[in-house]
Image (spheres, helix red, strand yellow):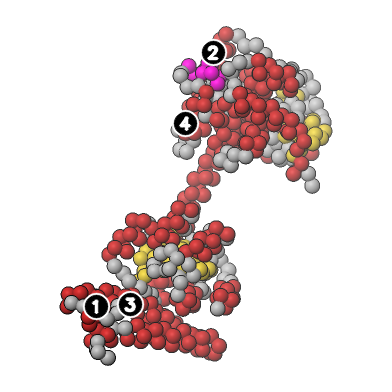
């Protein structure tokens, strides 16, 4: 019988237009399962299971379902227990409960524990069932659309901020890109899956630079000694970056990382407060290491020399993170190849391995910057007006090569 | 399933009857679902009548559901004909 069900599911006529909503139906009565497919299989893509655990397996191993419908009385796991589990793992799927015995307790439990969208009473006629499923699928679309919109808005806003930084201050943007790559390597090495906040914080770690006079920004980028007045400005940079993102919803974690990006592990440095050690966000501790290393290398130190200098700065860095960082410096080179290319041959995704300068020495873009469509446009415009030194050295990630 | 209701006190008999009625209500609803559901589809969609193999299969499901309903209702007999 299973075989026949699957065939019916597959032979549902394909109609052009919007995607057909996917519905999972769970019922231990084989006749009920066949009836469900016959009633709604023309309008929905239906998958079925005859108990809760099998239903969970289907949900775990296939594309998301818009709607999950379950019978109440089943031997292995009742419908409410099953739908509660579904809600826990796939909260966007809209849940419906079907029962041959509508009593008040079941209904109360279904709403309170299963957070169900509709309660259907057997026998269910086709019209009522279709209406419930259509409403549920519409609800699912609304929930998904809202999430996708929020994610896209947030991602695009961050991208726009970062692109503006690339145009306004190529040196700062290059530094931010190197910090982001460093964070990604650390996260790879530590096998962390929840990486969003730290990576975004790294990309935005230098946005405060837009407040600096260009010569001060350049000094920071090249690792030169700062005047006392410039030091004060530099100390304000993390707070500025924090303020810039603080008003964006869902960016609270990022703002906190930015606030402490220059703070020492032992609590020294800016901002002056009692936060120290592991109270500092992981992203801040990592950024402190990456940005200081970047400054040392920009000032002319070799990788090993920079690491030695940092190890001598007792109390500045999270010691275990510094060790991991030292290991990632070794791994970095193996995944990338360096090529020399003319500006017109640069492709999005490539990373500049050296500063792009005019023949008079003016820096146009800092090393470490990733080539984006906006950056490539800027380079083309600049090359038309000034003598740009070509070819430039670029890093191409192994996966990008044909 | 409730055995030997005749041996129990009247209040207990009533409680057992109500309990049984609850089960019967649930099971009959389930058994009638394919009977009503498939007949509705066949009455609404004449094209379905032309597909002989499928039609035969649906009739089997309807028949099975009706048989189940009959058997379930039969469980109530012990309450009005205990000696039988």
Task: Determine whether the residue tagged by mark 4 lies in a helix, strand or loop.
Answer: helix
* Tag 3 subunit: B
Q: Is residue A5 above or below residue A192?
A: below
Q: Main secondary structure of the magenta part?
A: loop
Q: Position of residue A340 (x, y in %)?
A: 82, 33
Residue in front for this viewpoint, A247 or A50: A50
Q: Which residue is mark 1?
A: B17
| Residue under the image location 66 percent in, 36 percent down | A189
Q: Position of residue A6 (x, y in %)?
A: 57, 73
Which residue range is magenta in the image?
A: A264-272
Q: Which residue is mark 2?
A: A232
Q: Are marks 4 and 1 on the same chain?
A: no
The answer to whether any part of residue A129 appears in the image is: yes
Task: Determine whether the residue tagged by mark 1 lies in a helix, strand or loop.
Answer: helix
Q: Are marks 1 and 2 on the same chain?
A: no
| Residue under the image location 65 percent in, 29 percent down | A324
Residue A269 covered by magenta stretch: yes
Q: Is residue A162 above or below residue A97?
A: above
Q: Position of residue A200 (x, y in %)?
A: 57, 35
Q: Which mark is residue B41?
A: none
- Decide: few, some or many residues near mark 2? Use Cα within 10 Å; few <14, some 14-19, many ≥20: few
Q: Are marks 3 and 1 in contact (CB under 8 Å)?
A: no
Sooner in the amino-acid sequence: mark 2 or mark 4: 2
Q: Is residue A343 above or below residue A54?
A: above
> Closer to us: mark 4 or mark 3?
3
Q: Are marks 2 and 4 on the same chain?
A: yes
Q: Quadrant of residue A304?
A: top right
Q: Which residue is mark 4?
A: A246
* Tag 4 subunit: A
């Amino acid at each position: 019988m299973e075989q026949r069900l699957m065939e019916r599911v597959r032979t549902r006529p394909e109609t052009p237009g919007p995607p057909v909503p996917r519905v999972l139906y769970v019922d231990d009565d084989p006749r009920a399962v066949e009836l469900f497919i016959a009633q709604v299989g023309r309008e929905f893509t239906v998958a079925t299971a005859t108990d809760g655990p099998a239903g969970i397996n289907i949900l775990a191993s296939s594309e998301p379902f818009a709607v999950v419908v379950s019978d109440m009385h089943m031997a292995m796991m009742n419908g409410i227990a099953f739908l509660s589990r579904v809600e826990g793992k796939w909260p966007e799927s809209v849940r419906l409960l079907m029962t041959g015995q509508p009593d008040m307790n079941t209904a109360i439990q279904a709403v309170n524990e299963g957070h169900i969208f509709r309660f259907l009473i057997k026998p269910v006629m086709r019209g009522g069932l279709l209406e419930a499923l259509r409403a549920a699928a519409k609800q699912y679309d609304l929930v998904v659309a809202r999430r996708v919109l929020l994610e896209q808005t947030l991602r695009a806003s961050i991208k726009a901020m970062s692109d503006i930084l690339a145009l306004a201050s190529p040196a700062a943007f290059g530094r931010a890109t190197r910090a982001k790559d460093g964070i990604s390597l650390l996260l790879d090495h530590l096998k962390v899956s929840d990486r969003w906040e730290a990576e975004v914080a790294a990309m935005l770690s230098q946005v405060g630079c837009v407040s600096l006079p260009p010569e001060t920004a350049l000094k920071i980028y090249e690792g030169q000694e700062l005047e006392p007045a410039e030091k004060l400005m530099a100390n304000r940079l993390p707070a500025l970056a924090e303020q810039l993102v603080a008003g964006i919803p869902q960016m609270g974690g990022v703002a906190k990382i930015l606030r402490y990006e220059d703070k020492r592990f032992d609590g020294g440095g800016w901002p002056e407060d009692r936060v120290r050690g592991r109270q500092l966000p992981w992203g801040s501790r990592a950024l402190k290491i990456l940005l200081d290393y970047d400054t040392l290398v920009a000032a002319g130190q070799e990788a090993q020399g920079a690491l030695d200098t940092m190890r001598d700065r007792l109390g500045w860095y999270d010691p275990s993170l510094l060790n991991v960082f030292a290991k990632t410096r070794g791994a970095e080179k193996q995944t990338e190849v360096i090529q020399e290319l003319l500006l017109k041959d640069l492709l999005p995704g490539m990373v500049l391995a050296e500063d792009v300068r005019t023949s008079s020495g003016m820096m146009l873009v800092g090393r470490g910057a990733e080539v984006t469509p906006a950056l490539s446009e800027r380079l083309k415009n600049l090359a038309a007006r000034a003598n740009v030194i070509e070819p430039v050295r670029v890093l191409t990630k192994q996966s990008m090569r044909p | 399933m409730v055995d030997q209701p005749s041996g129990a006190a009247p209040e207990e008999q009533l409680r057992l009857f109500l309990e049984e009625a609850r089960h019967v209500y649930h099971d009959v609803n389930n058994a009638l679902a394919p009977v009503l559901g498939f007949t509705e589809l066949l009455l609404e969609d004449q094209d379905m009548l032309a597909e002989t193999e499928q039609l035969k299969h649906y009739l089997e499901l309807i028949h099975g559901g009706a048989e189940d309903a009959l058997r379930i209702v039969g469980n109530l007999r012990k309450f009005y004909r205990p000696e039988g």
